[in-house]
Image (cartoon, rainbow, N blue to C red):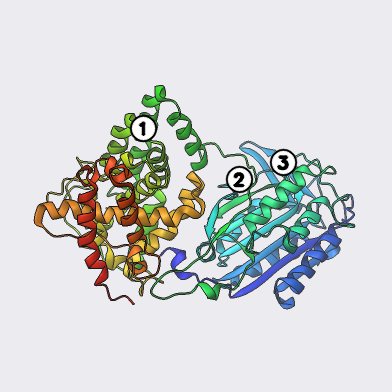
Amino acid sequence: MSDIRFLLNTHYSKNSALIIGINNYKNVTPLGYAVSDAKEIKDILIDELDFPTENVTYLVDEDATKTNILKAFMSFSNADLDEKIFIFFAGHGHTVEGFRGDVGFLVPYDAEMNDLSTLIRWEELTHNSEIIKAKHMFFIMDACYGGLALTRSPSSGSTRFLKDMMKRYSRQVLTAGKANEVVADSGGPIPNHSVFTGHLIEGIRGKAANQDGVITANGLMAYVGNKVANDKNSNQTPHYGYFDGDGDFIIKTPNLEDLEGETVDLDKLIIIPFAEQEQVRDSTEFKIKSIKSLLSNDSLSIELHDFSIKEVQKFLSKSSEDYFKPHGNVTKELVLERISKYEEISHDLLCSLACIAYWAKPIHKSLLQKIISRSSDRLEMEGGSVVLINLRWYPLILEAYYAGISAVESKNYDALAAIFMTEGLSNTDSREDKYFIEKIARSISNLHDAFKALPGYERNYVPMSEYLYKIIQPKLDDTLYIGKGYERSYDEFEILLALVHADIQSKDNGHVWGPIGRFGWKHKRHSSPFNELIEKAKLEKENWGPVKSGLFEGKVERFLEVAEKYKANLDGLHWY
């Protein structure tokens, strides 16, 4: 199955919701404001957020039986691929301790607390969401229970591309509290509403918006989480995050059509409000925290080495021929699947490498180069499909970009030079490329047509560059918080990649060439990142970071000579 990102659009085809509120239970103690909470959420969706009345299922009190709730939920199995689905439940929650941890339940109207079969197990909803095609589902539960089993915390405090979030699958959840916490059914910021839903309503109506007026599920969860945890009338701590995917449910947003473009990719970075969330042990976030701690102490260089090489070994194991056979019928679906799978299996290694490149000291140079060279251990020459063999270098391209952008962002040009000039990589063709940068430049060229075939990138001038620009940003922002400086660092990295390669090649055969990235179509604009980098080098001369690191023979004159020759290629582009 191909990556769902390439099937999704930057809009919603339909808005649907299931709203449930139970005050008066058949066999359980009543609540005071659950129905009032549910009605207000329903009215907001219909009156303010463009949810058609006919698309909103509303179940309260005696209508909110287990059968009716599950029937309404499963009706979403006919949802559109680009649909968004909002689920709200206000009522009792229940937690049972199991052998493997807490198991959470929602309590419907007709539940009998001594008979678990009459309750709705939370996992029944999450598992059944797999057969619902809608790209975005957001569950909000004004109830306390355990056993959420979240895969990752929301990316609060970071930046994201608005259109990109719309094209990523997601399943997100926000609950009023954890197991053994008592929900405050009154005393909230709005009369006749619980503390949790009161802050939720205020957030949806604008208080959770960022400076651009955008409200996302991540932003709303961060806002409500902070407000409820610090409310004087609350003794509960909201639990929230993803249980699948990495997109974001967009609640309110400006017109996305202003960002549409065919030959170039225009998008808008938005900031997700910050909120503290506990990290899941052995998650990517936990590994990043560990590697940052190891980097902070030079005496832990051996532990850092072992930690990093373990990630390389995991990657090599997962990228073996057993999982990525170089033979077979090459279809567009297979190429999309391979690209997505390579990104998945290399993710933790890439984030670790980005941290090392960002903070690398001289003692880390050998480790940086060892990670890169050893990552190519399974890339020996062999027969098979040209496309599939070329795709085996895609994770190494990702390594170059993750590490290179991170090094540029921190002005760590010694690390960048070490990355570019890494030797000892496996030989995958008859050419004797000495350095990592030569193999990467060749691989980028070899994969141009494969990325040109990606849905949505067919008309882009530089499809791989545009694609990587989008997929790398959220990962690096979670790891290093680059923020809105990401585009500048991305462009500078691609320019230096092109020029350092051009420098090496010109010495070998007199030909000045390097892969053209997004900076190519920007070159003839009023503000050209290529020209800006040249002017910076002229101004700083021998103190300019890339030259001080030893690139371009350590001479600014050599850089300018290569840059002017390369500039002639850019000036000859007829992209506008």
Q: Which residue is mark 1?
A: 361
Q: Position of residue 216 (x, y in %)?
A: 63, 60
In the picture, measured across the screen, residue 212 lies left or right of residue 264, that is right
Q: Alpha-carbon neighbours of circle 3 within 10 Å: few (<14), some, or many (≥20)?
A: some
> Does residue 119 appear left or right of residue 555 in this picture?
right
Residue at 59% over, 57% down: 171
Closer to the camera: disc 1 or disc 3? 1
Q: Secondary structure at mark 2?
A: loop
Which SS class for mark 1? loop
Under mark 2, the amino acid is Ala
Separation of residues labelled 2 and 3 (CA atoms): 14 Å
Looking at the rendered structure, the secondary structure element under dot 3 is: strand
Label 1 vs 3, first from the N-terminus: 3
**Figure check: 574 above or below 113:** below
**Amino acid, disc 1:** Lys
Vertical relation: 43 (above or below) 273? below
Which residue is at the front of the view, 246 or 256? Answer: 256
The quadrant of the rendering that contains the C terminus is bottom left
**Callout 1 environment at 10 Å: few (<14), some (14 to 19), or many (20+)?**
some
Q: Which mark is residue 54?
A: none
| Residue 41 x %, y % | 78, 64
Earlier sequence position, callout 2 versus callout 3 = 3
Q: Which residue is mark 3?
A: 96
Q: Residue at x 33, y 61 (%)?
A: 531
- Up the image or down, 536 lies above or below 368; here it is below
Amino acid type at mark 3: Val
Figure quadrant of the N terminus: bottom left
- Residue 150 screen position, x and y as percent: 59, 47
Cα distance between the residues tagged 1 and 2:
38 Å
Task: Say whether residue 379 is visible.
Answer: yes
- The residue under label 2 is 149
